[in-house]
Amino acid sequence: MSEIEKIKVTIFPDGRLDSCNAALYLGLSPKTLAMMRSAGNGPKFVKRGRIFYFLEDLQAWMEDQPRVRSTGEARALSEMKRPANDR
């Protein structure tokens, strides 16, 4: 049986994570998270000089993501969410 590797994520006492730790928590690269932030399709964040995410918002965003059985199904859902003038 393979071992599960635990990843250390740093969370501030008030529940904030910086961009790198938020990306690590979500299993994304920091660049992907930045692109999602720019496109407006990622989790909620605050900008206080730097970008921060709250753990509860990351968890809510993850729970809100549809579970799909194929990349085709994921693509179709993504297309449905896009405004008609962007298709």
Image (spheres, rainbow, N blue to C red):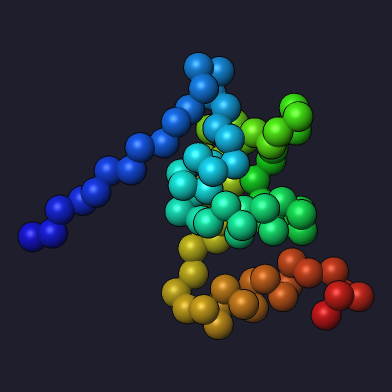
Residue 78 lies left or right of residue 65; in this view the side is right
Give the percent coordinates (x, y) of residue 36. Answer: 68, 57
Q: Nearer the viewer, residue 19 or 45?
A: 19
Residue occupying the far top of the picture: 13
Who's the residue at 55% across and 32% down the image? 17
Q: Is residue 60 visible?
A: no
Q: Quadrant of the N terminus?
A: bottom left
Q: Nearer the viewer, residue 8 or 65?
A: 8
Who's the residue at 53% across and 48% down the image? 23
Q: Nearer the viewer, residue 16 or 58?
A: 16
**Image height check: is 63 above or below 45?**
below
**Image height check: is 20 above or below 71?**
above
Residue occupying the far left of the picture: 1
Residue occupying the far right of the picture: 85
Residue 77 lies left or right of residue 55; in this view the side is right
Give the percent coordinates (x, y) of residue 21. Answer: 50, 40
Give the percent coordinates (x, y) of residue 15. Answer: 54, 24
**Image height check: is 24 above or below 79?**
above
Q: Quadrant of the C terminus?
A: bottom right
Who's the residue at 49% across and 63% down the image? 67
Q: How many numbered discs sit on the rendered protein? A: 0
Who's the residue at 86% across and 75% down the image? 86
Give the percent coordinates (x, y) of residue 5. Answer: 24, 49
